Image: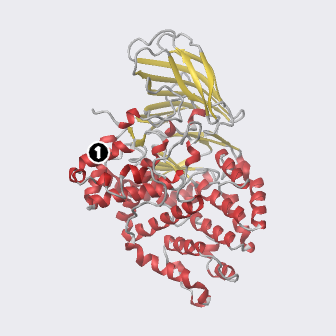
């Protein structure tokens, strides 16, 4: 097979020598201790040796991951190792090989302990869980956090299958991102069977290996799906998703090809989980914010399901190309939405995405370097610190632009199937996509579309910051958009008695309406009290997307009577997408709002993910 551009790409976020040896298989033998807040591990990691003369193995670890012993599995010989600093988010494990590996295979056994405080392993006290009774532990690998969970080549350029034996205290359940699982049947390396066993035969990058341990139960929600949750959440979660997931999966398969991961389960996370969802294969971790009671946020799951093709199957080779994961996933999510709910609904949802992108770019400045598709990540910079709306929504715009060049949506669907099949289980960069796109559509290559002035793939799309040069036609959503837009523009001219019945609107119409109010300056002082009284669907919403916008509206207009709503929202969840914008709004607001931000953070910081804590602290100091 022809060499990929990705085979020559660098990844400044890893210190591993993955171009000399490449991980071929991982087995983890883990003992989870809530008493000590540690994971004691024995890892067996196998490599394909790619270059001759290799005498050192370098793996990514973290200061909170302590290695005690390394041996060569085939010979049983203990190997000398050292650790060295790398960046603020990781260190390097250097293992010396006394001789060059015989043949093209090598396997090491590494004894280690993952201590509390590493960014990839979260320990929650009972108060931080939904049930408030038992503690909880979970791992979060994206982008470069799993090096604090187990030694690895922590780069998305390397994919390998994995297995694990996990020992947990009595009364706890373990789940992992794996298609095969059992309890009490498979012995660990010590010969004990009193543990959970997991296996995923498909190769994945290290960031997608995920573990959760807690008081969790499961309920079946489809032919290849279950939902896992704390007992107090299980019935509500089952009701929210039963029958929905299979509908999303089968639509995705029709559009993008076979679902390759066997199972698709959901794990409803504790409230402090910092993301909407994390697309861990076979077991998506999702925020409890999406369990609303009316299925109005189940499209979050469509996004994570879409990662089964774009991100998990075809993966960005480094974090500079994150848009390849997220831009294509946004496009796939919206194609599934369009197929299931119509183009108008999809266009309205996409419009809310454009509003988020515009808000982000207005805050950071259009020419901010993070507003490029291909982000330059300097050595030492944590890829997580480059996270924003750009790879999602500008990436979506670029995929839509490619579809516009093709013209026919069905032909582009067929291209996406071919793209997934071509690069499945591989990691790529944008140039690999471009080559395949032009090879698949030779007439477009003849038209030199990659260098069309103002729309050049490299010069403009990848390397120029700012608003995308092309955005899709979303006019099919006008029938749904016009009523909320017209009402937002003229609301102060009408008496509440004549205001429309928004209970008849879709959720995205409500979001669009509040977005338009947030965009406006100098709203009349009596408007928000009237709005609060008239529309409990907004001011007393359970839907977190509506709550976010209500908080932004309240803060911008310094409506202090509703500041308790802001406090309640920041107390009930720790999702990064919601938490950071609310703190930014508070710090840009009145003196009272700024004081409230500091007070709420003092009350909630111990319930937040460590990365979210750090970001909020920066905001409170006056940063972005």
The structure residue drawn at horizontal position 36% and vertical position 37%, both measured from the top left corner, is 5
**Helix, strand or loop for disc 1:** helix
Place of residue 197 in the rendered image (x, y in percent of width and height, measured from the top left): 50, 32
Instruction: Classify residue 106 by image quadrant.
Output: top left
Residue 193 visible to the viewer: no
Q: How many discs appear?
A: 1
Q: Quadrant of residue 554?
A: bottom right
User: Is 226 positioned to the left or the right of 579 in the image?
Assistant: left
The residue shown at (56%, 11%) is: 78
The C terminus is located in which quarter?
bottom right
Does the rendering let one see residue 602?
yes
The foreground one among 163 and 350 is 350
The percent coordinates of residue 320 (x first, y second) are 48, 43
Residue 49 % position (x, y): 41, 20
Which residue does the image show at 46% across and 58% down from the upper left?
A: 393
Please name the residue that numbered disc 1 is placed on.
436
> What's the coloring here?
secondary structure
How far across and how far down the image is residue 612, in percent? Answer: 65, 49
């Amino acid at each position: 097979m022809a060499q990929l551009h990705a085979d020559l790409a660098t990844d400044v976020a890893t210190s591993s020598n993955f171009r000399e040896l490449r991980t071929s298989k991982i087995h983890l033998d883990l003992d989870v201790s809530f008493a000590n807040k540690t994971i004691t591990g024995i890892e067996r990691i196998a490599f394909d040796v790619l270059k001759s003369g290799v005498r050192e193995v370098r793996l990514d670890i973290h200061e909170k991951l302590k290695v005690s012993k390394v041996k060569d599995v085939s010979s049983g010989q203990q190997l000398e190792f050292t650790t060295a600093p790398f960046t603020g988010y990781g260190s390097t494990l250097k293992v010396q090989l006394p001789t060059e590996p015989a043949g093209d295979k090598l396997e090491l056994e590494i004894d280690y302990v993952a201590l509390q405080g590493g960014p990839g392993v979260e320990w929650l006290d009972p108060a931080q869980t939904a049930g408030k009774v038992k503690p909880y532990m979970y791992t979060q690998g994206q982008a470069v956090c799993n090096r604090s969970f187990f030694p690895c080549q922590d780069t998305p350029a390397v994919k390998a299958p994995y297995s694990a034996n996990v020992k947990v205290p009595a009364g706890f359940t373990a789940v992992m991102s794996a298609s095969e699982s059992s309890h009490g049947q498979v012995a660990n390396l010590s010969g004990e069977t009193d543990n959970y066993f997991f296996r995923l035969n498909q190769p994945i990058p290290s960031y997608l290996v995920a573990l959760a341990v807690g008081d969790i139960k499961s309920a079946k929600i489809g032919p290849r799906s279950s939902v896992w949750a704390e007992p107090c959440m299980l019935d509500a979660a089952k009701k929210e998703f039963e029958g929905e997931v299979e509908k999303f999966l089968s639509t995705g398969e029709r559009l993008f090809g076979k679902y390759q991961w066997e199972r698709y389960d959901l794990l409803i996370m504790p409230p402090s989980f910092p993301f909407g969802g994390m697309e861990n294969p076979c077991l998506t971790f999702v925020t409890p914010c999406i369990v609303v009671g009316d299925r109005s946020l189940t499209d979050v799951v469509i996004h994570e399901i879409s990662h089964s093709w774009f991100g998990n199957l075809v993966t960005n080779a480094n974090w500079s190309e994150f848009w390849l994961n997220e831009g294509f996933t946004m496009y796939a999510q919206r194609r599934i939405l369009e197929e299931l709910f119509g183009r108008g609904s999809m266009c309205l949802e996409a419009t809310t995405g454009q509003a988020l992108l515009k808000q982000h770019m207005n805050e950071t400045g259009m020419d901010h370097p993070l507003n490029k598709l291909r982000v330059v990540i300097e050595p030492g910079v944590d890829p997580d610190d480059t996270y924003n709306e750009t790879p999602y929504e500008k990436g979506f715009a670029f995929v839509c632009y490619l579809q516009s060049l093709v013209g026919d949506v069905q032909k582009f669907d067929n291209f996406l199937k071919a793209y997934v099949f071509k690069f499945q289980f591989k990691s790529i960069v944008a140039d690999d996509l471009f080559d395949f796109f032009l090879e698949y559509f030779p007439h477009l290559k003849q038209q030199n579309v990659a260098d069309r002035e103002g729309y050049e793939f490299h010069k403009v799309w990848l390397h120029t910051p700012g608003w995308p040069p092309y955005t899709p036609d979303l006019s099919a959503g006008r029938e749904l958009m016009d009523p909320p837009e017209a009402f937002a523009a003229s609301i102060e001219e009408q008496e509440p008695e004549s205001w429309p019945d928004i209970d008849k609107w879709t959720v995205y119409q409500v979001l669009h309406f509040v977005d338009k109010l947030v965009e406006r300056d100098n709203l009349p002082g009596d408007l928000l009290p009237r709005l609060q009284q008239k529309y409990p669907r907004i001011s007393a919403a359970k839907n977190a997307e509506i709550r976010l916008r209500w908080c932004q509206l309240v803060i911008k207009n310094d409506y202090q009577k509703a500041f308790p709503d802001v406090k309640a929202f920041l107390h009930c969840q720790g999702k990064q997408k919601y938490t950071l914008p609310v703190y930014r709004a508070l710090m840009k607001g009145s003196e009272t709002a700024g004081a409230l931000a500091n007070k709420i953070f003092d009350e909630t910081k111990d319930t937040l993910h460590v990365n979210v804590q750090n970001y909020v602290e920066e905001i409170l100091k006056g940063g972005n």
